Image (cartoon, helix red, strand yellow):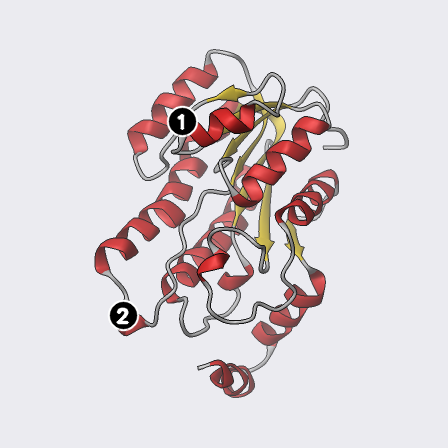
Amino acid sequence: MKSFAGKRIWIIGASAGIGHALARALSNEGAKLVLSARNLADLDELAGVCPGAEVLPVDVAAPESLEQAITQLSAAGKLDAVICTAALYDPARIADLDRARTQKLVQVNLLGMFEVARLCPPLLRDGGQLVLFGSVAGYFGLPGGQAYSATKAAVNNLAESLRLELAPRLDVRLVCPGFVRTRLTAKNTFKMPALIEPEDAARQVMRGLRGRAFEIHFPKRFTLAVKLLRLLPYSLSLRWASRLN
């Protein structure tokens, strides 16, 4: 997608974090946005600075909510892109996980993304982009974030399979951010390496969507190091990762 001007783009998870920053950046370039998340007040506030944006509350943890939104959107014609950033994050060591919160996290991060992947392709024009947010946390399992990392590893895998399954009609992309300053990462109690702002992340996503690479990952100084860790034999990678335990 060389230019976003006039493109009709649905952002699921637009109320905060990268989704919020991405909505503002795309609007500044003339995109016609549909803004979705659970919090209507936050969406209305965002729409106030995104001229012409449509507000459509959606809870990806509730399949009927997503289905109703898709029915409404399909009546207005095809979309140029669907971008799903929706996610929950609840860091804890495995013995301390709360079962109910973990189930909710899996419902949103993984099952919700499956529903987006299942239901959204018919909304997209030929050549349209289906953009799923995985994470660098899905590259390698580290202590303290097992539930989140496991769901993001699954999303990374899902996007890979969709890239093959939906080509050539759709352009499936995977976004894997490192640490971005959001209300989710504010839960971390450790120093986050290569931490960037949501606005920087939004610029990286847009640059990637203009290009042709399947995976958009950033910041490179961090993501490339984690990719290297994944490539090492377990005898080395687990020894290194044990220092974080």
Q: Which percent across, then down, holds residue 120?
A: 46, 30
Q: Sequence-wise, which precedes: disc 2 or disc 1?
A: 1
Depth check: 176 or 214 in front?
A: 176
Depth check: 39 or 231 in front?
A: 39
Q: Which label sits on residue 57?
A: 1
Q: Amino acid at mark 2?
A: Asp
Q: Residues within 10 Å of mark 2 (few under 14, many from 20)?
A: few
- Asked whether the viewer can see residue 36, the reply is no
Distance (Cα) linking label 2 and label 1: 32 Å
Q: Which percent across, then down, holds residue 82?
A: 54, 32
Q: Residue at x 59, y 59 (%)?
A: 178
Considering every residue shown, the one lying at the far top of the view is 75
Q: Amino acid at mark 1?
A: Pro
**Element under label 2?**
helix
Say whether residue 177 is left or right of residue 37: right
Say whether residue 222 is left or right of residue 239: right
Depth check: 148 or 165 in front?
A: 148
Q: Residue at x 42, y 16 (%)?
A: 72
Location of residue 91 with respect to 38 vertically, above or below = below
- Which residue is labeled 2 in the image? 96
The quadrant in which the N terminus is found is top right
**Element under label 1?**
loop
Depth check: 10 or 118 in front?
A: 10
Give the quadrant of residue 78. Answer: top right
